[in-house]
Structure formats: C-alpha cells, structure tokens
C-alpha cells in the first residue's frame, strides 16, 4: 500500500470515529489533522486511556464546630468570664474551672453537642469529662457559645497539667479540632 492510500484509509477511519473522542471536535478537523501529518506516528492511533476514579471529597464541613479559645479560669458564670477571669494556676483541693468558647454554623432549630475536656499530666490521663448540651437557635447562621467544666482537684498531681477541649456535633458526627491550655497545680 502506498503512502497516499494509507493516509486516505486512516482519514476515513478517523472520520468514522469523530465525535467519539473529545467533546467539541468536528469530523473534518480530525481528518484534516491526520491528513496533514508527514509521517504516521503512534499518537495518530486511537488508544483508550482509563478514566481515573474520582477522589472522594470529605463531607461538607460548614457545620463543624470550631473552638476559639480555652483557658483555666478562677470562676465562670457567664460568657465573657473566659477572658475576664483567666488564670495560670489552681491550688490542689480547690475547683479547677476550664472555660471554652466555640462557634458553629447552624441551619435553624435545636442542635445536639457534646463538650469534652481531658486533663493530662504529660501523657497520663488525670480525668475526662463530657457533657451533652442541646442548643436552640431561632435563626440560621453562625452562633457562638461560651461554657465551662469544673473539676475537683483533690487527687490531682502538682505541677504543670494540660486541659484539652473538643466539641462534637452529635447529629452529623462532626468534631472540632482540639485546643489545649496548660496550667499549674500548686500544693496546698
């Protein structure tokens, strides 16, 4: 077979396949590109490339709680006490109050949350406490709350301890990033 016959046959085959390849190409454009080739190459032959599997995207995180601040406070009774009553130490035997502020986008209605606090001495768990809380909002949007957990420190070791807080949303199973604060437990 001579070269002209080969190019004509290849052009006819490609014209028949036009429209099966990439979107937007016309049959005449494909045939013209092939006919203008000076030498047949491997790229002129049709090969099937496997389509990669789509990567799974993580679920929408718009409704994930976000911790803003965590601190040991001397007392806590209302929002704002986290900043106003921040302290660096507690005397063993006195209550330790760990306050935290978090926000979350809520569509509307009631949301079920779990507020969790771990107190650690290095890598050793001293105490873990979690509280389930229902929050109600009458309008959709970004809402901020401040809360606190109180611990009895009678059996706690002295020295530097760490309190780590996380907030979990129970309906959609989304958890905030953890935030920690360190404080000193002083001997009585």
Image (tube, helix red, strand yellow):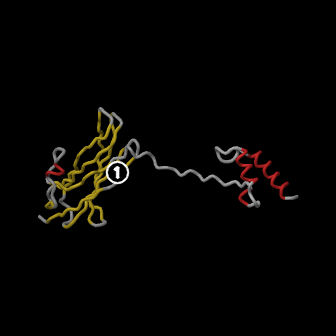
Does 33 sit above or below residue 126?
A: above
How far across and how far down the image is residue 41, in percent?
74, 61
Task: Specify few, some or many for label 1: CA neighbours under 10 Å numbering under 14, 14-19, or 20 or more.
Answer: some
**Residue sitting at x 28%, y 47%:** 102
Q: Image point 25% across, 48% down: which residue?
A: 101
Rendered position, 139 above or below 127: above
Rendered image quadrant of residue 106:
top left
User: Is residue 147 rendered to the left or right of residue 58?
Assistant: left
For the image, the number of numbered tags is 1
Q: Residue at x 19, y 45 (%)?
A: 79
Secondary structure under tag 1 reads loop
* Residue closest to the eye, 188 or 11: 11
Residue 177, picture quadrant:
bottom left
Q: Quadrant of the N terminus?
A: bottom right
Residue with the mark numbered 1:
176
> Which x, y percent locates residue 174?
39, 47
Pinpoint residue 130: horizontal percent, then vertical percent: 29, 50
In the rendered image, the residue lying farthest to the left is 188
Q: Residue 43 location, x and y as percent?
A: 71, 58
Residue at 59% from the left image edge and 52% from the top image edge? 53
| 118 left or right, relative to 50 | left
Is 174 left, or right, of 149 in this rendering? right
Residue extending farthest to the top is: 138
Depth check: give the residue in front, 116 or 32.
Answer: 32
Position of the C terminus, as image quadrant, is bottom left
Residue at the right extreme of this rendering: 1
Image quadrant of residue 48? bottom right
């Amino acid at each position: 077979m001579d070269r002209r016959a080969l190019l004509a046959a290849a052009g006819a085959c490609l014209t028949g396949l036009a429209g099966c390849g990439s979107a937007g190409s016309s049959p005449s454009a494909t045939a013209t590109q092939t006919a203008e080739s000076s030498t047949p190459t491997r790229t002129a032959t049709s090969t099937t490339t496997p389509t990669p599997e789509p990567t799974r995207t993580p679920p929408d995180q718009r409704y994930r709680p976000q911790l803003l601040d965590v601190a040991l406070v001397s007392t806590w009774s209302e929002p704002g006490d986290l900043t106003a009553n921040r302290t660096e130490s507690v005397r063993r035997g006195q209550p330790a109050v760990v306050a935290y502020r978090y926000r979350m986008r809520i569509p509307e209605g009631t949301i079920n949350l779990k507020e969790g606090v771990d107190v650690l001495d290095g890598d050793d768990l001293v105490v873990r406490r979690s509280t389930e809380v229902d929050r109600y909002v009458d309008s959709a949007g970004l809402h901020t709350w401040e809360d606190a957990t109180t611990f009895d420190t009678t059996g706690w070791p002295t020295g530097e301890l760490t309190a780590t807080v996380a907030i979990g949303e129970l309906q959609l199973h989304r958890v905030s990033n953890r935030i920690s604060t360190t404080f000193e437990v002083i001997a009585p």
